[in-house]
Amino acid sequence: MFTRQSFKNHYEGIIEPFRIIGNVYFVGTFPASSHLIDTGDGLILIDTGYNDTLFLLINSIYKLGFSPQDIKYIIHTHWHWDHTEATAALVHLCGAKTFIGEKDFENAKKYFIPDVCLKDGDVIELGNTKINVMETPGHTRGCISLFFEADENGIKYQVGTFGGAGANTLRKGSFDYEGCREDYRNSLNMLRKKKVDVFIGNHVWNNDTQTKGDILRTTGENRFINSEIWYEFLDFCEKRLDKVIEDEAADKK
Ligand SMILES: [Zn+2]
């Protein structure tokens, strides 16, 4: 669990699109996740991925029976290129309104000009969907996590994502900003207060998207419904932060 795979080219990490739960779909690739929500009044896309995987994203949306032209909102978990690079080209295609955490606004301008800056407690509403925004700084200063409800067969599920789990920016020399480690730990504590029935990772390795997706598509068994994995992943993230700090202390000896 929680292991990565790397590819020479991003577009080699193809994943067959599928419905995760209710109106929530996976349309990303292995190197960068993207999720689509069919709100009944247009589509919301969470993260766009790389320019060289945009054709796969568009193909995945079509394969599921939707049209990229119906994307109304694009929400970004943070400004890094694996979540934002394809946004400018996609906006050209569909004219969607773009959202990002307020404190990632300046950096995001490397890839696109965000229309809306989000703050802690903001709610993004479209059609049948209300997405609650939580600021979870650490991986980047403006990283946000998203929480919303999805309905399947009359059962309501709490869906959640941690918008920036990566430890790469927590290492000395690669800091996104001073104080990022303290922020990251605080963010984990805030995230632990949320109840999440269906954890959607903003990278496939966060929640074993591919394996669970293959099982879901072939057998109908939905292993995304698991209220423990959220906490397991947050613990994993905290241990990884501790390890970064320990390794650094060991190097100094
Ligand atoms: Zn990142």
Image (cartoon, grey):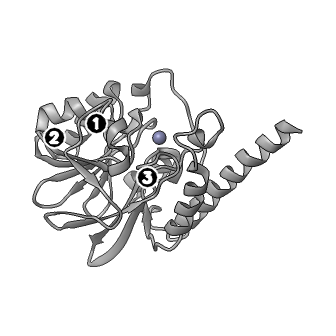
| Camera-side residue of 203 and 106 | 106
- Above/below status of 227 relative to 93: below
Pick the quarter of the image with the C terminus.
top right
Disc 2 to disc 1: CB gap under 8 Å: yes
Some atom of ligand 1 lies within 8 Å of the CB belonging to the residue at label 2:
no
Q: CA distance from mark 2 to mark 1?
A: 9 Å
Counting residues from the N terminus, which is met first, the one under dot 3 or under dot 2? 2
Which circle marks residue 4 in the picture?
none
Which circle marks residue 163 in the picture?
3
Instruction: Give percent across and percent down for residue 60.
Output: 27, 39
Instruction: Give percent across and percent down for residue 219.
Output: 42, 57
Which residue carries the number 2 mark? 68
- Above/below status of 193 relative to 234: below
Amino acid carrying mark 1 in the image: Leu
* Mark 3 element type: loop
| Camera-side residue of 236 and 209 | 236
Q: Residue furthest top?
A: 8
Instruction: Give percent across and percent down for residue 225.
Output: 44, 67
Which residue carries the number 1 mark? 57
Give the residue displayed 21% in from the left and 29% down from the top: 89
Instruction: Give percent across and percent down for residue 117.
Output: 26, 51
* Mark 1 element type: helix
Counting residues from the N terminus, which is met first, the one under dot 1 or under dot 3? 1
Q: Is residue 229 visible?
A: no
Counting residues from the N terminus, which is met first, the one under dot 2 or under dot 1? 1
